[in-house]
Image: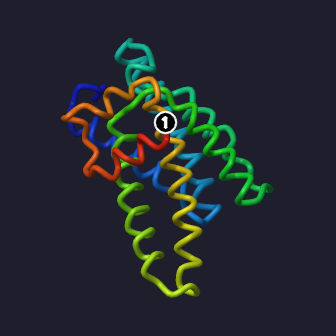
Amino acid sequence: MGGGIPICRQAQTKLEVSLYMFLWSPDTEAVLVAMSCFRHLCEEADIRSAADEVPVQNILPNYPTFSELASVSNMMGTGRSTLQKRVMALLRRVEHPTPGNIEAWEDTYAKWDQVTKQILNSPKNKADDGQVSMLHQGSLLSSISSVYRNNFDVCLAPDFSTSSTSACFFLRLCFY
């Protein structure tokens, strides 16, 4: 049912990346919508799993975490800080590196690095908005980095896809 078709795997990866990227948004509503959309990834995995007669974790390795993210997406009454703490706690439960969480980590790192440089070179009053964004991005980076704890040698391999030595340095900081 599409699991072996490259464009289907690419679409799943892009959707996963997009949802991860929205989790560090300063807009609470955007975070809640992204969380609820993880439910659709799980539903698709359930359908494909039944049709292809394979375990759901073969299709969506982080199914349990995504399912839990979707189930707490109704935290509308909570504040942004409480919501972010909950999201980051759930992301620390991500167990399997996937093309989606690797790409999301790399994209978030690039944005975090860019915002950090802007903050360092900006007058104080312009830096405030960037600092909030940088904090949210940094939280996502450290949370997703936890998936590599058991696979740290993968991150140090020459063919690992991190695009800069700074990203590898950030990963090392997360582990020590």
Q: Residue at x 63, y 61 (%)?
A: 29
Q: Position of residue 78 (x, y in %)?
A: 78, 55
| Residue 143 to residue 64: above or below | below
Residue kind at label 1, given as amino acid type: Phe
**The N terminus, quarter of image:** top left
Q: Which corner quadrant of the image does residue 80 belong to?
A: bottom right
Q: Residue at x 59, y 46 (%)?
A: 36
User: Does 139 sit left or right of 147 as displayed?
Assistant: right
Nearest to the observer: residue 76 or residue 131: 131
Nearest to the observer: residue 130 or residue 54: 130
Nearest to the observer: residue 134 or residue 30: 134
Nearest to the observer: residue 144 or residue 69: 144
| Residue 109 to residue 168: above or below | below
Report the residue marked by disc 1: 175
Q: Residue at x 49, y 36 (%)?
A: 175
User: Does 98 sit left or right of 76 as displayed?
Assistant: left
Q: Which corner quadrant of the image does residue 76 belong to?
A: bottom right
Q: Position of residue 13 (x, y in %)?
A: 34, 41
Q: Position of residue 147 (x, y in %)?
A: 47, 32
- Find the residue positioned furthest to the right: 77
Classed neighbour count for the residue bearing mark 1: other residues with Cα under 10 Å, few (<14), some (14–19), many (≥20)? few
| Residue 63 to residue 77: above or below | above
